[in-house]
Amino acid sequence: MSRRICIELHDEIKNLRPQWYHKEDDKGVMKIVMTGSASDGKEYLEHTRSKDKRKELAKVFKDPKSDFKLVIVRDMWLTGFDVPCLNTLYIDKIINITI
């Protein structure tokens, strides 16, 4: 539920499947999509992107022929993000429901 947790999960998956990782956005199987802050440490910089870069990643992720198959998302790409070829979506977030 935090950007730090996203990075920790990414790093654990990278340790288990190093072949899935690539620092460049146009390569690799997995990426993190999250916003950035001017006060972010160096471990955040690789995973924060401009709005245009996030749009480009979304386009690549929606392409069924792309190698990009796993995304860890922090508060983005949820509502209205349709991917016909997407197999699984897991949301780890507290949802408050008022009746």
Image (cartoon, grey):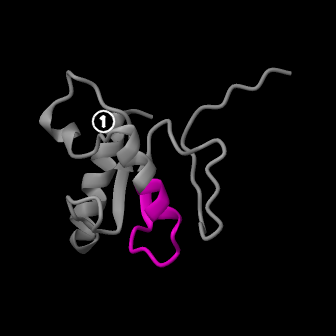
Q: Position of residue 45 (x, y in %)?
A: 20, 39
- Amino acid type shown at disc 1: Arg
Residue at 69% across, 25% down:
96
Magenta-drawn segment: 57-71
Specify whether residue 15 is in view: yes
For label 1, the residue is 4
**Does the magenta segment cover residue 23?**
no
Q: Which quadrant holds the C terminus?
A: top right
Give the farthest residue toward the left.
42
Locate residue 88 relative to residue 55 in the image: left or right: right
Rendered view: 14 above or below 80: below
* Residue shown at the point (22%, 64%) measured from the top left: 22
Front in this rendered view, residue 95 or 62: 62
Q: Position of residue 23 (x, y in %)?
A: 20, 58
Residue at the limit of the structure toward the bottom, as seen here: 65
Horizontal side of 82 relative to 64 (left or right) equals: right
Can you see residue 33?
no
Q: Report the side of 49 relative to 1 (left or right).
A: left
User: Residue farthest to the right?
Assistant: 99
Please report the residue visible at 20 percent of the width from the left and 21 percent of the height from the top: 39
Quadrant location, the N terminus:
top left
In-front residue for pair 27/72: 27
Q: Residue furthest front?
A: 52
Q: In the structure shown, which secondary structural element does the residue marked by tag 1 occupy?
A: helix
**For this rendering, which residue is in front, 34 or 12?**
34
Rendered location of residue 78, percent (x, y): 59, 44
| Residue 18, horizontal then vertical, whole percent | 21, 69
